[in-house]
Image (tube, grey):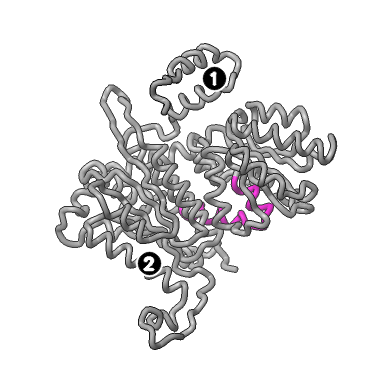
Amino acid sequence: MPDYRRRSAREAMSVRVDLSGAVAQTHEAWLLERRELEAVASQLAGLTELLQRRRQAGELPCLSSIEDRQAWQAVRALADRVREGCETLVVVGAGGTALASRALLEALCPDGARLQFLDHVDPHSLSLCLERFDLQRTVFHLVSKSGETPETLAQFLLLRDLLLRELGGVDYTERLVVTTDADQGALRQIVHDEGFRSLALPAGVADRFAVLTAAALFPAAVLGVRIDEVLAGAQWMEQRCAGKDPWRNPAALLAAVSFVLERQHRVSGLFCLPFSTRLAGLAAWAGELWVEAVRREETPGGAPVVVPWLPVARPGWDCALAAQLAAGGAGAVLSVLLTVEDHGRELPLAAAYADLEALAYLGGKSLGEVMAERAHALGLLLRQHRRPFVRLRVPQVNPFTVGQLLYLWQMVVLYLAALYGLDPFRQPVADEYRRLLLAMLGRKGLEDVAAEGGGLLREQPEWVV
């Protein structure tokens, strides 16, 4: 096991941001030139200093939480107690916090037999899932930043009733662990009243920014992940992003490239494509975090700011469809390819059917080579179609590199928001939706909102066919 206290080990496992597919070596109108980046680079040193000051002042707990030793000791201690007698861990939640948990857990805990997610309230699928669990050997980890997410509370009510009926009024509490705000919210009150084991989310952490908190690291620790290596990876990336020289700062440079592509080249689609199944959840989280933080139309200080970033649908493992989405059509898209150099297993292909050219060329290669060439072919196609792309080059998928990826992406988003002059944690439209959902579900005090909404959605029979 590498000793990540040594710089040589950290360098060997460093995630690299490769911007070769977005920056021109010679003049090409569709790519960026250094002079375009230099105009933004002058701002980045000041933004780096600003973000570091805010981090040190505790204003960015999504970043500073990686140094909270007391919190991580509590996570490890509870994980050690829960691990005994836990054959299946079920992460229960909805929305951004659940997505953040998936980003880390699918990368580091891909064993579907031991790890399950309940991140929806579809009654049919949920009932089928619950029927499969051995409640005597299952632990449910409920996560809600606010403690009042209606979908998560609905899941809690369902699980609590099931566990009470099956296990009784004493034993059922051992099957639930709650991670929520330390001081407020309905779930925190329930923890105090009923004695569930619990962990706290840092105050001020927005849901999708909870990826390096107990929301994701507690279940990872239960399943045996070395979370100290995840945190070491995040801390190593923090060091790399702390320098004021933007040309040596991976997060600042990626943010600058993206910003100039959108402002000067009308690139407003973001497409994250993972070349490893273990990074699929991370890619989904990355795209949504980016768009949630910066897609906005508002007027800070009286000056209009329109940021049109939109995520491009993820095509899973169909690279031909990925090529069509990224390179086809009139809309310009920034593709981010998450490539892995060492998958841990190569799986060589036997040399057979030498007389069939459709198979002969594959003999002697490995699945790792096939995966690598898929990424190369997509990059070549994007260049031929004059579409910019970026590669995040991951040496291996392990706790240290995943910690780097998670910290890097949060920093990129924070830089982007600063370049646009936006507050990445402010979500006015999402907050409006949550208010409408609570009103339609009958939350006390929102009767007027529910009445107004019901009027707007009045059925028009002549248009029901």
- Whole-number angstrom distance, CA of label 2 to CA of label 1: 48 Å
Q: Residue 385 got which mark?
A: none
Residue at 74% over, 29% down: 192
What amino acid is labelled 2 in the image? Arg
Is 186 in the magenta? no
* Dominant secondary structure of the residues highlighted in magenta in the image: helix
- Name the quadrant of the N terminus: bottom right
- Residue that mark 2 sits on: 374
Query: Viewed as shown, does residue 93 lie left or right of 31?
Result: right
User: Residue 398 at x, y = what percent?
Assistant: 54, 61
Judged from the image, the secondary structure of the residue bearing numbered disc 2 is: helix
- Name the quadrant of the C terminus: top left
Residue 315 quadrant: bottom left
Residue at 50% over, 43% down: 63
Q: Which residues are magenta?
A: 216-237
Identify which residue, 377 or 388, lies in the foreground: 377
